[in-house]
Amino acid sequence: MSNSTSKSTFNFFSFSLWLTAAFSGFVLAIYAYLGTFSRHLADDYCAVDFIKKNFFNALWVNYTNVSDRFSNFMLISLSEFLGARSVAVLPALMIILWVIGIAWLLYEASRFNGQAWNRPIILTLTLLLVFFSLLQAPNRFQILYWRSSMATHFAPLVLMPYLASSILRSIFTAEKKPTDHWVYPLLFLTSFLIGGFSEPTALVMVSLLSLGIFSTWFWMKRITRGAALTLLSVSFAGAVLALMVMAVSPANSFRLDNAVPPTIPVLFSRAFRYGFEFIFNSFRTLPLPTFFTALMPFLIFYHLYSPPTLELTAAKRKQTQLMLAVVPVLSYLLIVASFLPSVYGQSFPVERARFAGQVCLVAGLMIETSMLGSLFAQYRSQIVSALKFKLVSVILLAVTALYPLRAMWITLGDIPEYRDRAKAWDMREAQIYEAREQGKTKLIIIQFDGLEGVKELDVNANHWVNRCAAKYYKVDSIRAITDK
């Protein structure tokens, strides 16, 4: 941790950190506020069966006939049980939980590494990671504001940091006392349930836990090495079991629509190619967010490791230089892993299925430039000292802290559209209930346009969305037309 001899510089750095955290947090608050206008869409209507039937029977029916993913079913079922308006609370809840989980993970990781970053550093890095991930999401609407997609592709990413933090904390505390026996089955169950949200995140978990086991086995020298291997192994087993349970689901035949999956060589060839294309397209289409994703962590860590902080030891420098080569490869492999299920069944992943890959890309880029910043700070020549690069870095950080204001301004412009649609949806639902009370069972309602690739109610009463909506509102049929 940096303890600058210049009080003003240190205060300016703290101010820049808080400014960065505040502006990033403002954008996330607006994202959360937009979520209050979320309403049922497409698959959301089908959730009515989840609370009308015996839960475990409904879980089995869903697993065998609808989807191999079982944990997203549980989250949707719980949400529907709490009330229809819970869909308007989930976006804010998920963002808050993600921020808390990542902050906890950064705290445990820094403590495990012997650094123990202070709260401003952890909060700023956390908010930057969440902000840049959601800013660059391939389809933010589907990820945040469509419950069915959120429960599949966002929720597991929210929960994974809690699992990782628990593992790190258990390893760290094992140096003082043996790990309680109940921790192992709890980690196994947690890993199993998180893995059950979707195949892409399950494969990312399996990949990360495999890397953790490999690294612990070959390089960890602590006395807790055995406990660490056990903790990682039981978590790995839970994720693998979740993946196997999803793989053998009878519902997969419906999702694949009897299509012949690619052979293993073709599968991996396409996945590696799609992963590269995804990274290239992300950099090409989002140059400004990519630039700031890389620059801001670089500036933070350059300042942290600039004089008069302690110089990195030769071993630490060598380790950091090695990681500079490892992190991009690891990020790429994690993206490929998240793409594999989609490549197996649907060719190039749809937008919502690319979010896990986007998070891996953002996190990898931030980690890479953070290490670059710490290494550049070790170059302590007279020229560097004369030009006061440390002061320049903190001034640049204060300037770049304003970047989230651009995203905030753009997002504020979406509020009227979201609010008006929510009002119209509420009015339409009130009309449905009124018609039902009058004894009408074959309803004709106003049709809205679909949103961000999400299907709205159709003119055909036999469309699957309409059938689910009819069950949801307890009527015989529903048709949606542009002019009632």
Image (cartoon, helix red, strand yellow):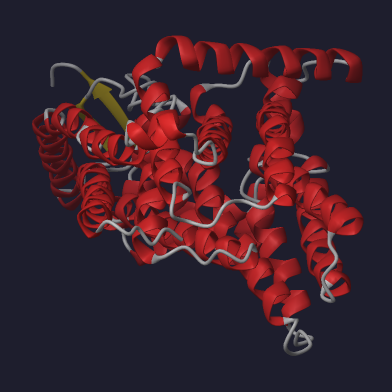
> Would you place residue 164 above or below residue 353 in this image?
below
Q: Residue furthest front?
A: 382
Residue 324: give x, y in percent of width and height: 66, 33
Residue 306: give x, y in percent of width and height: 44, 46
Instruction: Give the number of callouts.
Output: 0
Q: Is residue 74 left or right of residue 457?
A: right
Residue at position x 31%, y 47% from top? 473
Give 43 or 122, whichever is nearer the viewer: 122
Quadrant placement of the C terminus: top left
Q: Is residue 282 left or right of residue 28?
A: right
- Residue 471: which quarter of the image? top left
> Would you place residue 422 above or below residue 462 in this image?
below
Give 90 or 54, whichever is nearer the viewer: 90
Residue at position x 26%, y 24% from top? 480
Q: In the rendered image, is residue 371 in sight?
A: yes
> Would you place residue 169 above or below residue 444 in this image?
below
Give 286 or 66, whichever is nearer the viewer: 286
Q: Is residue 109 left or right of residue 464?
A: right
Residue 233: give x, y in percent of width and height: 84, 62
Residue at position x 47%, y 30% from top? 464
- Residue 105: which quarter of the image? bottom right
Give 394 or 334, whichever is nearer the viewer: 394
Residue at position x 49%, y 44% from top? 154
Q: Is residue 278 left or right of residue 12?
A: right
Q: In the rendered image, is residue 466 in sight?
A: no
Residue 304: give x, y in percent of width and height: 43, 50
